[in-house]
Amino acid sequence: MHQMTLAEIARGLADKKFSSEELTKVLLARITQLDPQLNSFISLTEELALEQAKAADARRANGESGALLGAPIAHKDLFCTQGIRTSCGSKMLDNFKAPYDATVVAKLAAAGAVTLGKTNMDEFAMGSANESSWYGAVKNPWNLEHVPGGSSGGSAAAVAARLLPAATATDTGGSIRQPAAFTNLTGLKPTYGRVSRWGMIAYASSLDQGGPLARTAEDCAILLQGMAGFDQNDSTSIDEPVPDYSASLGQSLQGLRIGVPKEYFSAGLDPRIADLIQNSIKELQKLGAVIKEISLPNMQHAIPAYYVIAPAEASSNLSRFDGVRFGHRCENPENLIDLYKRSRGEGFGPEVQRRIMVGAYALSAGYYDAYYLKAQKIRRLVKNDFMAAFNEVDIILGPTTPNPAWKLGAKNSDPVAAYLEDVYTITANLAGLPGLSMPAGFVDGLPVGVQLLAPYFQEGRLLNVAHQYQLNTDWHTRTPTGF
């Protein structure tokens, strides 16, 4: 049962081959048995899961149907879940139980999805390795000595290890696509505003976007269908009709124009990954795609711009965690200033503190124009590069990451080295574009991903290309040894 995809589970439930309750019990037992090796979950919600599974079975017995009705999933632990701990991977929120459901959680619950638990993550989604979590590092099921990627590493590791078929995740600078690449999954960051951010604890409000992590593009289409849509509670949500993502998976790739930016193949890219990307290009050419070299000249400025904008927004968003209304509070504060200082100093880990300080500095009176304003101007140039490219091509293809997953602890003493691993993913967040990572092979036994980017609201196009690619390759079917 644990080897089934979301699509296979939907067919099995519809054909009455098993019940949602039976499947849920199997997966809960599997998580209990195997997750101690991975540390991919922060909270398990057995009672809720069994209650939801029974309700889903009853709905099916009454004639209801739906791809997500009775399907087991998990939520990244920054989506608020009513009455359940929502920690954001931080000591600051270790005692916080959300008083309401995030829109994404509510929509998936209404569709009949079964919540098995909340997955581990980098603290407040800040990181590329899932090592900054207060609950400890998550391990990559392909090699337990390596990172699974971050910040959605818990969701990625759990799905890759077949503990469940799919999970929600979020992407601020590559935090869906990079873990997908490191764990042999398909991960989709939708267009900014496509999925509601209401009830999703913010890191950088103009960059954060929720999306699906699963083994196949077909499964991502199913999960995104349940997540996407306008939400009046979210002022950044866009009122755009949600297409049937599964219906577009069968389209031919004949004549599809794929742009390959020359800037992607620089000295920083592992040559073995470059070879795998070229193999993917050849596979898509066999399916009828036309390849064209393009240029994204301002890509070189994206990392410094991102690491000004994101910490600046984080320093503002995280100011609410002050030890007064909710979250961690220090013992016996001497006065209000002492309460603030010690509560925040004790509640936030080193990476979060580092980014708050960088952000506060960039927003300060003497440096706002020199750093933050300049970074926003670069952001516009990055977007303009993409708009020009999409006048010539339908999608853009390249590597998801410059290197495969590194060893746990290898970059802890050099945060900038970890930041540079986001070089290919952050541009999509700066521009608000949809991006997808799909499995493309292995280097030294570790998975490698290929990234696809598309114009706004063209998630269906990305899913279609990935699905056609997966019908003709088997990378996405490989399972880590022992799982």
Image (cartoon, helix red, strand yellow):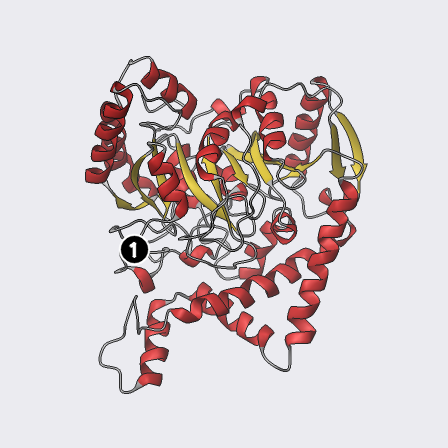
Residue 284 can be seen, yes or no: yes
Q: Residue 299: in sight, yes or no?
A: no
Determine the residue positioned at 46% across, 66% down.
Answer: 317
Badge 1 crowding class, 10 Å Cα cut-off, few under 14, some 14 to 19, many 20 or more, is: some
Q: Find the residue positioned furthest to the bottom.
A: 335
* Percent of width and height locating residue 129: 47, 50
Q: Quadrant of the C terminus?
A: top left
Q: Which residue is mark 1?
A: 98
- 306 sits left or right of 160 in the view: right
Residue 194 location (% of width, % of height): 54, 43
Residue at (72% x, 63% y) in the render: 377
Q: Position of residue 327 (x, y in %)?
A: 30, 66
Q: Position of residue 396 (x, y in %)?
A: 70, 37
Q: Quadrant of residue 113?
A: top left
Residue type at numbered disc 1: Ala
Could you say which quadrant of the image residue 469 lies in? top right
Q: Is residue 261 left or right of residue 185?
A: right
Q: Residue at coordinates 27% horizontally, 17% vertically from top-left?
A: 18
- The total of numbered circles placed on residues is 1
Q: Quadrant of the N terminus?
A: top left
Look at the picture and state if 100 lies above or below 450.
below
> In the picture provided, is 95 more to the left or to the right than 212?
left
Q: At 48% across and 53% down in the image, what residue appears?
A: 234
User: Does residue 81 sit above or below 280 in this rendering?
Assistant: below
- Give the secondary structure at mark 1: loop
Residue 20 or residue 294, whichever sits in front: 20
